C-alpha cells in the first residue's frame, strides 16, 4: 500500500474518532478491542468437609490451569440441589464432587442424565461399571494405599509393643490377593519381627471365641489362643473383650457392620481398614480421598479436552486418613515418610512381597489368601 493511501486511511480514522467525541462518546481504546474469550468453568462441591481439602488450594490449581472455578460446601443431603444448581449454569463444563467413602450411585445416575457436562467424582473407593461416559471416578491407588496401611500396622505394633497383627479372614473381603500381600509387605518392612494371625470374622459375633495361628517371631511358630486359654497380657500384643483374646491390632479387608465395630472397640482393638468403612471415627487408618494433585490432573485434562479414564487412580499423598486419637504423633510421622517414599514407586512395590523371606511367605500366604476377595 502506498504511503499516500495509508495516510488517507489514518486521516479518515482520526476524523471518525473526532466525530464520535463530538457526540459525547470517548474514543475507543484499540488495545482493548479484542473478542471476549470465556474461560472453561468448573464447580467443585465439598461434601461434609473432606480432609486435606480447602477452597484456596482449588482456586490456586484452577488459576494455574486457566479455569474459572466456584467452590461449594454442602452436606450429603444437599448434594442433589448443589449438582442441580451447578449444571443449571450453561457456562459450567465440569462438575467435581469431593467426598469420603464410595462414590454414590445417585451421583453417577445424575451425571448420566447430563451428558454434556463432565463429572469428576472423588472418593475413597470406586463403583465398578458406572455406565456413564462423561464421568471419571478419582480414587486412591489401592496397592500403594495397602502398602502404606500395612506400614501403619507394623509401626503401631512397635509403638504398642504388640507381637502380632490380626487379619480378619472369611466373610466378604473386597481386596484382591495382590493388595493384601502388599499390606503384609508394608507391615514387614516397618516391623520385621511382627507376627501375623488369622482372625475369623465370624468370631466377632456375640459368644464366639477367637482363635487362629500366626507367626510370633520371624520364623512363624506362635499361636493366638481362644477362650479355652487364658488371654495374654496387653504387653504381649493381645487384649481381652467379650469375644475372648484378640490381637491388639487388627486389619480388615472388608466392610464391617456396626455390631462388629462395637465388638472390636469394646475389646480395645486398634482397627486398620484397607477399604472404606461406613462408620466414621472407628478406625485408626483407612484409605483417604485423593488430594489436590489429582485435581490438577482433572483440570488439565478438562482444559486440553483430553478424554479421561473412567477411573483415575492417585498414588500421591495423602494416601491414608489417620485418627489422631488412636495413632501417636511419632507413628503419624513415620507413616507420612512412608507415603512420600512410595510415591511413583509402583514397580518397586510390585516386588515388595518377594522381598519377604520365603519361609514367612509360606507361613503367611494362607492368611493373605483368606483375607482376600473371591477371584484373587
Image: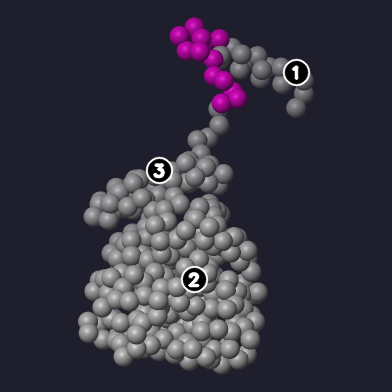
* First reached walking from the N terminus: tag 2 or tag 1: 1
The residue labelled by disc 2 is 161
Gap in angstroms between the C-alphas marked 3 and 2: 48 Å
Name the image quarter holding residue 229. bottom left
Q: Position of residue 316 (x, y in %)?
A: 56, 61
Q: Nearer the viewer, residue 115 or 281?
A: 281
Q: Secondary structure at mark 3?
A: strand
Q: Secondary structure at mark 2?
A: loop
Whether residues under marks 3 and 2 lie with C-beta atoms below 8 angstroms apart, the answer is no
Gap in angstroms between the C-alphas marked 3 and 1: 54 Å
328 relative position to 279: left or right? right
Of marks 2 and 1, the one in the foreground: 2
* First reached walking from the N terminus: tag 3 or tag 1: 1
The residue labelled by disc 3 is 70
Of marks 3 and 1, the one in the foreground: 3
* Within-10-Å neighbours for mark 3: few <14, some 14–19, many 20+: some
The residue labelled by disc 1 is 4
Whether residues under marks 2 and 1 lie with C-beta atoms below 8 angstroms apart, the answer is no
Instruction: Name the residue located 41 percent from the left edge and 73 percent from the top edge.
Output: 234
Of marks 3 and 2, the one in the foreground: 2
Is 364 contained in the magenta span? no
* First reached walking from the N terminus: tag 3 or tag 2: 3
Q: Position of residue 358 (x, y in %)?
A: 62, 90
- Magenta range: 18-32
Furthest toward the right, the residue is 3
30 relative position to 133: left or right? right
Q: Is residue 221 above or below residue 131?
A: below
Amino acid at each position: 500500500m502506498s504511503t499516500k493511501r495509508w495516510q488517507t486511511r489514518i486521516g479518515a480514522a482520526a476524523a471518525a474518532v473526532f466525530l464520535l467525541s463530538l457526540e459525547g462518546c470517548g474514543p475507543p481504546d484499540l488495545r482493548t478491542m479484542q473478542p471476549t474469550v470465556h474461560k472453561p468453568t468448573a464447580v467443585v462441591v465439598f461434601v461434609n468437609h473432606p480432609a486435606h481439602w480447602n477452597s484456596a488450594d482449588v482456586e490456586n490449581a484452577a488459576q494455574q490451569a486457566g479455569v474459572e472455578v466456584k467452590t461449594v460446601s454442602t452436606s450429603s443431603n444437599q448434594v442433589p440441589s448443589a449438582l442441580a444448581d451447578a449444571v443449571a449454569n450453561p457456562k459450567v463444563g465440569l462438575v467435581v464432587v469431593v467426598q469420603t467413602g464410595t462414590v454414590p450411585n445417585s451421583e453417577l445416575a445424575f451425571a448420566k442424565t447430563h451428558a454434556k457436562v463432565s463429572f469428576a467424582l472423588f472418593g475413597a473407593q470406586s463403583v465398578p461399571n458406572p455406565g456413564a461416559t462423561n464421568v471419571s471416578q478419582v480414587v486412591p491407588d489401592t496397592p500403594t494405599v495397602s502398602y502404606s496401611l500395612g506400614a501403619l500396622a507394623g509401626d503401631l505394633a512397635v509403638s504398642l509393643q504388640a507381637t502380632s497383627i490380626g487379619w480378619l479372614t472369611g466373610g466378604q473381603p473386597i481386596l484382591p490377593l495382590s493388595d493384601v500381600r502388599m499390606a503384609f509387605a508394608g507391615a514387614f518392612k516397618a516391623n520385621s519381627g511382627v507376627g501375623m494371625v488369622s482372625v475369623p470374622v465370624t468370631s466377632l459375633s456375640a459368644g464366639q471365641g477367637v482363635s487362629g495361628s500366626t507367626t510370633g517371631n520371624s520364623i512363624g511358630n506362635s499361636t493366638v489362643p481362644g477362650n479355652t486359654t487364658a488371654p495374654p497380657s496387653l504387653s504381649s500384643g493381645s487384649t481381652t473383650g467379650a469375644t475372648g483374646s484378640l490381637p491388639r491390632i487388627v486389619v480388615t479387608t472388608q466392610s464391617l457392620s456396626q455390631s462388629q465395630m462395637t465388638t472390636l472397640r469394646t475389646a480395645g482393638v486398634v482397627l486398620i481398614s484397607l477399604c472404606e468403612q461406613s462408620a466414621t471415627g472407628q478406625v485408626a487408618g483407612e484409605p483417604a480421598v485423593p488430594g489436590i494433585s489429582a485435581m490438577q490432573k482433572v483440570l488439565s485434562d478438562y482444559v486440553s479436552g483430553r478424554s479421561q479414564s473412567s477411573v483415575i487412580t492417585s498414588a500421591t499423598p495423602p494416601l491414608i486418613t489417620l485418627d489422631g486419637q488412636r495413632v501417636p504423633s511419632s507413628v503419624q510421622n513415620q507413616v507420612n515418610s512412608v507415603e512420600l517414599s512410595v510415591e511413583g514407586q509402583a514397580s518397586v512395590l510390585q516386588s515388595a512381597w518377594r522381598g519377604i523371606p520365603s519361609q514367612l511367605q509360606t507361613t503367611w500366604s494362607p492368611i493373605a489368601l483368606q483375607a482376600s476377595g473371591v477371584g484373587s
